[in-house]
Amino acid sequence: MSLLVGTLAFGLPAAQAQTAPSGRAELAGTKPVWTSTAADQGATADATRVSARVYLAGQDAAGLTAYAQAVADPQSSQYGRYLTPEQAQQRFGATQAQIDAVTKWLKSAGLTVTDTNQHYISVSGDVAAVRTAFGTSLHDFRKDGRTYRAPAQAASAPAALAGVVLTVTGLDNAPHRAKPQDTLPGPGDGFRNSGPFSTYYGQNTATTLPDAYGTKIPYAVRGYTGEQLRAAYGAGRYTGKGVTVAITDAYASPTMAADAAQYAKRNGDQAYRKGQYKEVLPDSWNSTTDCGASGWYGEESLDVEAVHAMAPDANIVFVAGASCNDPDLLDALNKVVDKRLADIVSNSWSDVEANETPDSAAAYDRTFKLGAVEGIGFYFSSGDDGDEAANSGKKQVGSPVNSAWVTAVGGTSLAVGKNDKYQFETGWGTQKALLSADGTSWVNLPGTFTGGAGGGTSATVQQPFYQRGIVPDSLAKAGGSTRMRAVPDIAAVGDPNTGFLVGQTQAWPDGTVSYDEARIGGTSLSAPVIAGVQALAQQAQHFPIGFANPGIYARYHSPLYHDVTDHPFGPGRDLAVARVDFANSTDAADGLKTSVRTLGQDTSLHAVQGYDDVTGVGTPAPGYISSYAFPFRR
């Protein structure tokens, strides 16, 4: 069995005698790239307290990789032969003897063990104890105008534990240290759309506004509903019955269950059965201010309501992270895997790849592989800032959406017409131009970039087997001679201007708190929509799809996908919608702002025929879902 060529380019931690102290094994990737000599401010004080996690490699890491690929590949004789969580732990998990050995080492160095589970051992102690345990001094370094602590050399473990310790995280404290808090804030500030609207794409033409691109343009839709999205992506008779979708986000909206029920009632979705929606919450919350806790409530509402709209019979379990920090989000993912809480996991969060460290990437990948052997598929939004150049100063993809073990979901602008008829899609990338003061023209059309689907080529993850021969070298080798992982894999509606109607309890300027609905988008919408589509496909297949990418790419170049391009009606024919928004985001008291939003303008990324870095292989077309009802053959 050939191994998946998709592990991180910097690899898993391994013994490297030429750099680690004698008798020790280096934990590769534990020295951040920003710890240059020029940035070094000297040694961190020995008395400084440090909290870290030592992740365990478990048994047979190579075997885990091979088995995860085999059970996910429809061409493999082992396809679908998933393990239970108990079987996965017995075969690939850390043994008690391994846990005891690592614990003994950490305690002998003077560290205090604060938590232990099958994935990691949490420790705390001073810098002196860290130096003893991990064979590295900690220094202070300047980064982005601030000073952070980090290892001056790569961390290491005793050579006898080289195959036992996966990595250690927490030795550096960029970007910030979390401060524990016990309660969540109330609903966040409210947002409403103004209108006029279209009830379906093209229904209401802005006849009194100036032309754009030589024609009158339609007003943006009020927000698509489940009926429209199910029709657009070929749901047919499938409802997701027998499938469970998990959603991970930071924090938890205190009104989620009530909001979801009200939304379904108001918008024609099936009412929730008793027990159909459940929540798994941590014992406490932290970093609520740094993470903007209430800002996550809208994300949760979007995710839950979109999955239910697409797959009305699927069970939904919301698994909350205690914060927006990597360790807490990874804990949420591990809860899903350890108890196999779901078949499909939708994740509408990410960071830029430059902020990803090899140690955390290794920990995430191990969780994704364990999920794969259990028949669990992870779906991540690709980002909302296009190539990220304007946002971060360099073109890059996101993380952990860059992992070769997850399905990266890009975004589109979607036109659903009268009688729920699919009209077209473009890659999601929007430019905004305001109406002139005299109302006769658009100022500097097409205007400025406001958002677009993330995508591009990873700088750290090599090309996985399922992308070979499909992703063109112009993308795979965009960063050099080695083929690397391209993002995204598949796509669905993401443009806020052709977005989904979402209901949420919010706080209003007059001091009231109440439920209302507004149109929302982003690849934060795309991911749960695709998760819902995959729930329908799994119902058709009658057993878990698991890690979906091999099957997704096997269907490439078939009528099962809409091959989305930025100009579906031909080169040079730009498309746009008109929007009228409240200046203060809630009502007309401070006036209105009228703009034109040009579609298919995603920074340096382009949706073209074939695989592209905005929509991947495309969006699901009629027949995609039902194709899982039988072994797929081209």
Image (cartoon, rainbow, N blue to C red):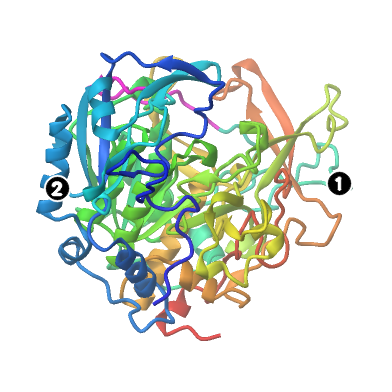
Q: Nearer the viewer, residue 345 or 529?
A: 345
Residue 309 x, y percent position in the rendering? 42, 55
Q: Nearer the viewer, residue 158 or 44?
A: 158
Tally of numbered tags: 2
**Residue at which label 1 appears:** 213
For the magenta stretch, what is the residue range? 177-192
**Residue at which label 2 appears:** 99
Residue at 45% x, 58% y is 7
Q: Is residue 257 visible?
A: no
Residue at 37% x, 47% y is 17
- Indicate the quadrant where residue 279 lies: top left
As helix, strand or loop, the secondary structure at mark 2 comes to: helix
Position of the N terminus, as image quadrant, is bottom left
**Viewer-nearest of discs 1 and 2:** 2
Which numbered dot is residue 264? none
Amino acid type, label 2: Ile
Q: Are marks 1 and 2 in contact (CB under 8 Å)?
A: no
Q: Nearer the viewer, residue 482 or 132?
A: 132
Residue 76 x, y percent position in the rendering? 39, 81
Pointer 2 local density, CA inside 10 Å: few below 14, some 14–19, many at least 20: many
Using residue 629 as the reference point, say whether residue 480 is left or right of it.
Answer: right
Residue 176 x, y percent position in the rendering? 40, 22
Pointer 1 local density, CA inside 10 Å: few below 14, some 14–19, many at least 20: some
Position of the C terminus, as image quadrant, is bottom right
Q: Nearer the viewer, residue 263 or 390?
A: 390
Using residue 504 as the reference point, say whether residue 483 is left or right of it.
Answer: right
* Residue 187 among magenta residues: yes
Using residue 255 as the reference point, say whether residue 404 is left or right of it.
Answer: right
Using residue 92 as the reference point, say whether residue 139 is left or right of it.
Answer: right
Q: Is residue 505 visible?
A: yes
Residue at 83% x, 36% y is 445
N-terminal label among 1 and 2: 2
